[in-house]
Structure formats: structure tokens, C-alpha cells
Image (cartoon, rainbow, N blue to C red):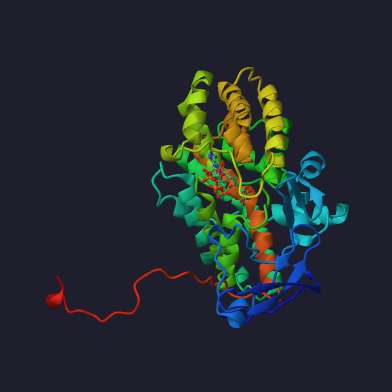
Amino acid sequence: MATTTKTAAAPKAGRNEHTVTLTDNATGKSWTFPVMDGSIGPKVIDVRKLYADTGFFTYDPGFTSTGSCQSALTFIDGDEGVLLHRGYAIEDLAEHSDFMEVCYLLLNGELPNAAQKAKFEHDITYHTMVHEQLQYLYRGFRRDAHPMAVMVGVVGALSAFYHDSTDINDPHQRMVASHRLIAKMPTIAAMAYKYSLGQPFVYPRNDLDYATNFLRMCFAVPCEDYRINPVLSKAMDRIFILHADHEQNASTSTVRLAGSSGANPFACIAAGIASLWGPAHGGANEAVLNMLREIGSKDKVPEYVKRAKSKDSGFRLMGFGHRVYKNYDPRAAVMRKTCHEVLEELGVKDEPLLDLAMELERVALEDDYFVSKKLYPNVDFYSGIILKAMGFPTSMFTVLFALARTVGWVAQWKEMIEDPSQKIGRPRQLYTGPTKRAYVAVAKRK
Ligand code: SDX
């Protein structure tokens, strides 16, 4: 693997005299391991030397108790329902900031001053166009292809068009690739939507802000002027903020693992998009709408809650539960508030799906199964209702999640590349297969 130049010191975790000792009761042997402190949150036991010292691996499928890296980007307190980006609470950012500021904050560690913000917005805006030949890639897909399949393909192909920003060892190229990905995702996503409709692609405009530009590329048609709705633009921008980053979730860990081999940033983000697509992860927003449509009416809610509690049903309440949040996902609370604002702006008096979602939430949160397992609505529970009201088809919901999460993936990828302790990710295993055995010629097999 090419040696990467480390341009910035990794976030230094605190080292002190705190240690833990592991004793093998079979042999009486003991080993001591250092404990590392972060700035907030659980301490970690540094087990990097565990196998060399003890001959044991750790075993943690799903990484429920494993820290994969040091990071200064995002902190979640799952018990308290707290989400911080570089120390700023998600509620404050959603209320007072905008997505471009949050992008700058995640990438650079501080909120921008006015000049920095203007330059960053300019840099992103002037990267929103895609190479003109990229449009021919879309023609290889059927019109009814799932837009997430298109996104995985098109984003993965970007390295074929932007070779001049694929050298991960060059800080300037890392920055250009980061800006290109953040800037071009709305254009690529809107093109996927237009392609599915059989409508012409709409070019980005440099006089529009990020969210408005995206909405216009999705909903403008050549036959008439597009009417900007500032309330919808603000709601879209806020939804992007709520999805920007979220510690070491499955898709972010996918991006980090892909990047640890030295793969180019476009390929890594395509891998993240593929992972996000799963219904247990970012695909849940699409699955929530499909679930609500299947439930159909409030009187069916008890039946579906009962099914969700049954191990044999294989059914789960989509948009409920979270690996980290054992309290209400703070993003879901902001999303629910935004839902009411958007529906009011659009004059939607009674959205049956929203009424149904709120009834489902009420029943579930009064049920001991969900209360005891600390299963609360997550970011995906209400988002689909807003996006549907804004005119997006269900199949585009996870595309919007990927669009917004690109800044988180890129910022985490950049942090990993610049971490001096970074190594290629290569987990071990507990082997349960056959022990060594002799080969048997086919003539002698039973
Ligand atoms: C996202 O990681 C992130 O940060 C992700 C994300 C981000 O911003 O990147 O926040 C975005 O992916 C949100 C999650 C979206 N997914 C869903 O809404 C799908 C439905 N939820 C789940 O499948 C589940 O809750 C997960 C996948 C989100 C979390 O799964 P865990 O942490 O592995 O928990 P688990 O499967 O071990 O469940 C614990 C218990 C189990 O019961 P027991 O075996 O202990 O008896 O809770 C039950 C589960 O059966 N359970 C549910 C449930 N979720 C968990 N039961 C019914 N309905 C559910 N939704």
C-alpha cells in the first residue's frame, strides 16, 4: 500500500496511568493494558497489543463494544439522546446554522467566519456541474432502475472523470475531491431522479444556495420557470444538516475501511452509498413509508406492533430502534417538528401517513417491549413523510440521505487519511470450520 503522508496530527486521546488487567483463569497468567481517555464519552481499553501479548483475539460481531478509531467529528450520548458535531448540539445547528456551515464545520473543525463561509460556498457552488459525458452513464440504466443503484454506479465512476483529485497523499487533491463530492452529489442525485422520470436533466445554477439548487434540479422543467419556496428550501437544508454525520455507523465504517487500503475517495464514497442502502441503515426511510402504507389505518396499528414484538414474524418497526440511541433520537424530534412545518406550508391539513406514524409512535412508546428495549423513533421515522410531501418518490429517500451524508463520509475519510496511527483495516475471526484434512480424489469420494 502506498505510504500516506501524515499531514495533521491525529486527535490526541489522553494517555494516563489508568490500566486494566486481564487474567486467564485457565493459566493464571495476567496482562495489563492501557486505558485511553477521549474528551467526553466512554474510555477505551487499548487492545492493539492483545494478540501479540496474549495470543487471544477479541470477539465483537457488529462492533457493539469496539472503538475502530479516534475521531473529533461527532459525539453521540445514546442514553441522553445527545448528538454533537465538533461540540455543537444538532438542535442548535438545525435551528441556527445551514448545511454549508455544517459542511465547513465537519471538514475544518470550526464554524466559518463570514469570509470563510463565503469562500467555501463559492468553492462548492463552482463544482456543482458534472463532466458533460457523465450523462451518458445514466443511459446504460433502465428508466425504472432504483436510483440508489444509479448512485452507486455513477459516483463510483467519478474517479474515471476526475483523475486529478485521486492522489490521497496530496492534501490539495484530498480537499478538491472532498469539495467535488459534496458539490456534485445534488447534481448526480437530481439527474438520477430526472432520468427515472424521462425528463431532461436540469443544470445547477450558481446564483442559488445548495438546497434550493437541488430542489430546482429535481423539480424544474424547461416549459416554465421554477418557483422557489423558501420554506421548502429551508426544510431541505435542515434535513441535510440532520443527516450530515453520525460517528462510525455502518456506511461511514465502510468508507473508512475502503479508504484504509488507499482506494480513491470516489470509490470509497460509492462503497458508503452501497452500505447505506440497506433497510437496517439508510434504506429505513424508504422502508418506513412502505410499512406505513402496508399498515394502512390506525386500527391495524396494534396488529403490527404485536408482529414487531414477535421474534418469529421477522417484522420490525422500521424507523424504530438504534444501536446507540437508547433514548429519543434528537434528529427525529427536529424531523417531526419540520414535518408539521412543511405540511402546513403545503396546506396539507390531514396527512394520513403522519397521523398513522404518530399513532404508531404513541402505541409503541406505551408498550413495555419497546420501553424495556429502549426502542425509540430514529432519524428515519418521520423523514419520509416530509420528503413525500415535498414531491419525492419513496425510491429517492435514501438517495437524499446519501447526498447529505456525503460530507460526513468525506470528513471521516479525510480524518482517517490524516491520522498518523491509521493502518489498513483487517479484522481477525473466530474460526469454526474444519481442521486440516487430506484431499480425496473424486473417484474415492462417497
Ligand atoms: C440509521 O448507526 C447509525 O448511526 C445509523 C444512523 C445514521 O445516522 O447513520 O442513525 C441511521 O441507520 C438509523 C436506523 C434505521 N434502521 C431502522 O429503523 C430499521 C429498524 N431498526 C432495527 O433493525 C434496529 O433497531 C437497528 C438495526 C437500527 C439497531 O439494531 P441493533 O443495535 O443491532 O439492535 P438489535 O437488532 O440487537 O435489537 C435489540 C433488540 C432485539 O430484541 P432481542 O433480540 O434483544 O429480544 O431490540 C429488538 C431486536 O429484536 N429490536 C426491534 C427493533 N429494533 C430492535 N424490535 C422491533 N422493531 C425494531 N425496529
Find residue 336 and report its horizontal and vertical position in percent.
68, 32
Viewed as shown, does residue 251 lie left or right of 82?
Answer: left
Q: How many marks?
A: 0
Which residue is rendered at x = 60% and y = 51% of the image?
A: 185
Q: Is residue 238 above or below residue 53?
A: above
Which residue is rendered at x = 77% and y = 50% of the image?
A: 84
Query: Within the image, what quadrant is residue 388 found in?
Result: top right
Ligand 1's image quarter is: top right
Viewed as shown, does residue 343 lie left or right of 80?
Answer: left
Query: Within the image, what quadrant is residue 392 found in?
Result: top right
Viewed as shown, does residue 163 lie left or right of 110?
Answer: left
Find residue 214 and report its horizontal and vertical position in percent.
63, 42
Quadrant where the C terminus is found in the figure: bottom left
Find residue 45 and report its horizontal and vertical position in percent.
70, 69
Q: Is residue 225 above or below residue 211?
A: above
Which residue is rendered at x = 46% and y = 36% of the image?
A: 310
Res 47 visible:
no
Res 35 visible:
yes
The residue most toward the left is: 443
Which residue is rendered at x = 52% and y = 30% of the image?
A: 305
Find residue 223 and report its horizontal and vertical position in percent.
55, 31
Quadrant where the N terminus is found in the figure: bottom right
